[in-house]
Image (cartoon, rainbow, N blue to C red):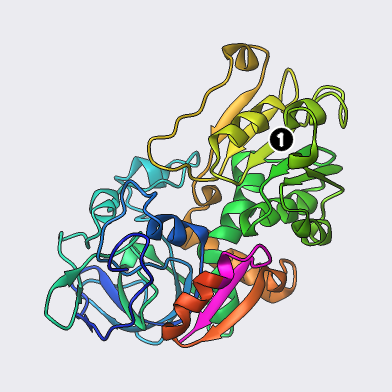
Amino acid sequence: ARAAKQPLTHETITVDPPKAGEVRVKVTANALCHTDIYTLDGYDPEGLFPCILGHEAGCVVESVGEGVTSVQPGDHVIPCYTPQCSSVQCIFCQSPKTNLCPAIRSTQGQGVMPDKTSRFKDAEGQPIYHFMGCSTMSEYTVLAEISCAKIKKDAPLEKVCLFGCGVSTGLGAVWNTCKVEVNATVAVFGLGAVGLAVIQGAKMAGASKIIAVDINSKKFDAAIKMGATDTVDSSKLDKPIQSHIAGEMTQWGVDYSFDCTGNTNVMRAALECAHRGWGTSCVIGVAASGHEISTRPFQLVTGRVWKGTAFGGFKSRRDVPLLVDRFMKGDLPIDDYITHEFDGVENTNAAIEALHDGTCLRAVVKY
């Protein structure tokens, strides 16, 4: 990505060997996530150019740097933009309350490796920024060891790559962040891959009513297949969606609501359709730079809880391999998320075009 709002360029680059605590991997499959497009379109406050985008991938370890012990060449890994250092000194990794390990957060946000340099150079020898600690829209990339979730070698990388971001985020928002109970009522705003994963997770948790909300009715069939019991096209209503859900579809609102849009107006609607007295609303979607959320304080005074989640609260290196294991056992199907497939890193722009189509959930590019 040479600049915001410009098509990606197909270039031959140099990927340097891994330094201490780093791993160089061969990327075999990369799934496009809307966060990549959000950055490419110039909405990301941390967006840096030129960079190599991509953060939802399946990879094979090619070489390791000094001191790396958790993976070795030939191992299969899923890069995780939320690392897990597991240090006994890391109060975040040691806490069961969060997955937000800050060990490499500052340098990752600056588009460089922990030593503050890049492992990518273009044909002129100029450095290229990293992205989200992953940069998987490249045939090879370098990751921090603490960002590598080692998985079983028999898992198909072109499928389980989805556990690197969107599907895990949606499932975890339900299971970890909100801990949705059996017979709970749920509303999901935004029916992309993350929203559908919320629906899937809610169904698996035993929710009794799952309301799927979007302004594109073409997405409803997929939502119903995942487990939605009701669908609402909010653009067709003559009243705010929160008044429709809390008042018409339910008496007092839903036990849990989830925003999967990144739209701050939708975040407010999601909160305000949560049940009086105990409803919880979870923000998953990432809003554009500078946007703020708002509601009347009375909404919180009367018992609603507003919370957010990153990577669904999963501790990456511990939990992603477990999700892959559940998929391999047949307990966690994800094939339906993959609606488009492409061959060759040079077809990533075609995958981006597909993602802009309202029928695309995940476009996977196999290298």
Q: Position of residue 219 (x, y in %)?
A: 75, 58
Residue at position x 27%, y 53% in the image: 104
Q: Is residue 339 visible?
A: yes
Rendered view: 48 above or below 349: above
Nearer the observer, 58 or 262: 262
Q: Secondary structure at mark 1?
A: strand
Rendered view: 194 above or below 10: above
Q: Which residue is mark 1?
A: 256
Magenta segment boundaries in residue numbering = 354-367
Residue at position x 87%, y 48% in the image: 229
8 with respect to 29 (left or right)? left
Which amino acid does the dot numbered 1 rest on? Tyr
Residue at position x 62%, y 11% in the image: 298
Nearer the observer, 157 or 95: 157
Residue 296 falls in which quadrant of the image?
A: top right
Nearer the observer, 187 or 65: 187
